[in-house]
Image (spheres, rainbow, N blue to C red):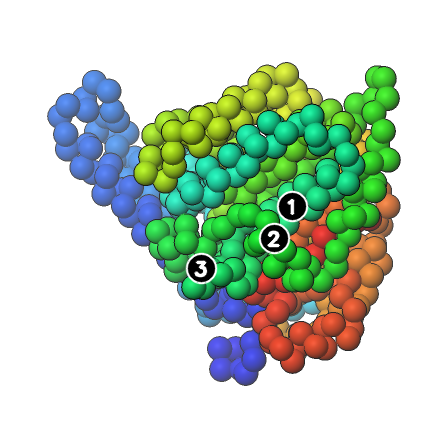
Amino acid sequence: MLLLLPDPSFAHETLVIHWPAIIANLVDHIHQLIDGTLAAASDDTLASGGLGEAAADLKINEGEEIISKVIRLKHRMESDQELEKIPEDGEFYVDEYNSELEKLARIGKNTWFVVPWLFAESYLYRLIRSYFKQTTYWADFDPFRTKKEETFRNSATAVYQIATMMHDMDSEKDSLVDPAKLLVLFKEMVQMCLWCVAILTSSRVVAVASMFRGNATDLSFLIHLAPCDIEQFQEVGRDAQRVRKEYILKDDQESAWEHIESLQPRAGLVARCDIVLDNAGFELFTDLVFADFLVTHTPYFSTVIFHPKLFPWFVSDVTPADFYRTIQSLSSPTFFNKTATTTESARHLKEMVERWERYLREGVFCLSTALEGGQKKTQFWTGPWPYWYMEDKANELWRSLSESSLVIIKGDLKFIPCAWHPLSLLMHALSLVIARDVKWPVSTPFATALGPLAGSFPLLSLRTNKSDVVVGVPQDAADRLDKQDKRWKVNGKYAASVLL
């Protein structure tokens, strides 16, 4: 019945289109790997170095069981059945997810068509994680790794182009002491992180990110797009960034820079930037470039801490393995197609990545999971709650971020304050944000909607609009956009850079 209702919400679109497509692709991928295991097991040459026959059989049987569970999940989703409990799989937050399910059941909001959207999407990936975690040969498997790497390979041209841009910046480092020049570069970095994709029509930059719905290449929305199509949409440069600026609905770039300038370097002071990562691949690459700019070309930051997700999440989110593998891929002379660059650009990339590797060794760059207590703190990013509850649900993480000079939050999901957006159209309103039990108008200040987290630490949120949930936009601007483009809240064309 939900499929027949007019003007469906983005949450409805996610339920009936995106999630089933993601599941279908996952099933196909595991089928291919099972076929590969069967072929390998039949090769006598594997007797000494590959899986034995019994191990191969177990891996195949486990893969087939995962497929069966995922197909069953898809059926339950599409027929509006209850969300099942997360099984005890040895991972974290089992009780927390199941406790939330019990609360939803008591109010009749525990089936797929009416469950709160944020919880449903988080639950989906946590449940899929449990299917793999309970096996022997698939426990640490990332079912989205291949897609992430394929997409990143098709970003070669943009990667080399940015590497050369950074090389030129290095060459002009002595002239970059002027704060006005640094501000210009800072804005370019922010816009690069907001939109890592531009659309070209007749060699002219026309719009931004509307094919990809947001920051970089968010693969959960690229299911139907072939990797070879991606490169043509990726474009960097000042012209593209100037065009993009008009699509930033809330623009705190200059205020953010004023805050950074206030971090005047003092003896013994370690100014720290924390970046809460979103998508792997090209977007992670641009995050590293941004971090490089902050510590190499400004005098304000001494270290950058990157916060990943602990397990495969929302298809393309960065895991610790993705982070380190990206550095390795960028260091490999064979990862990208050599025809996509020149010898000079390849050298520029090599020099830049070698600097990043040195920064990782020296602690200038650091993954949060490598720090003391980092694994526990990182759990929160894949929990069932929006950021509103950080101080209560992840106090150690909250206290750690409170010591940061600037926290940059990337992406779309839990940036949204209490985005408990229901799939039920009975509670759906395109112009309203649902936060806890309150419907916020789009003009609600971000600080108001963010609740107790506001003011906890200096926060720069970089977000492209990829869901119905939007705050901080003047009502007249929202009314104008509603007339111009009914999908402005979800198509990734518009963005916000918000400082609190």
Q: Tell which of 292 and 284 is nearer to you.
A: 292
Counting residues from the N terminus, which is met first, the one under dot 2 or under dot 3?
3
Question: Of the numbered discs in the image, which one, if any, rests on residue 241?
Answer: 2
Within 10 Å of the Cα at label 1, are there few (<14), some (14-19), or many (20+) other Cα atoms? many
* Disc 1 from disc 3: Cα separation: 21 Å
SS at badge 1? helix
Q: Inspect the image, locate mark 3, and give the three-letter code of the amino acid beneath it.
A: Ser
Q: Inspect the image, locate mark 2, and give the three-letter code of the amino acid beneath it.
A: Gln
Residue drawn at x 41%, y 50% is 231
SS at badge 2? helix
Q: Are the residues flagged by discs 1 and 2 in contact, CB closer than 8 Å?
A: yes
Q: Picture coordinates of residue 358 (x, y %)? A: 58, 18
Counting residues from the N terminus, which is met first, the one under dot 1 or under dot 2?
1
Residue drawn at x 64%, y 49% is 191
Question: Of the numbered discs in the image, which one, if any, rests on residue 203?
Answer: 3
Q: In the rendered image, which residue does mark 1 sit on?
A: 188
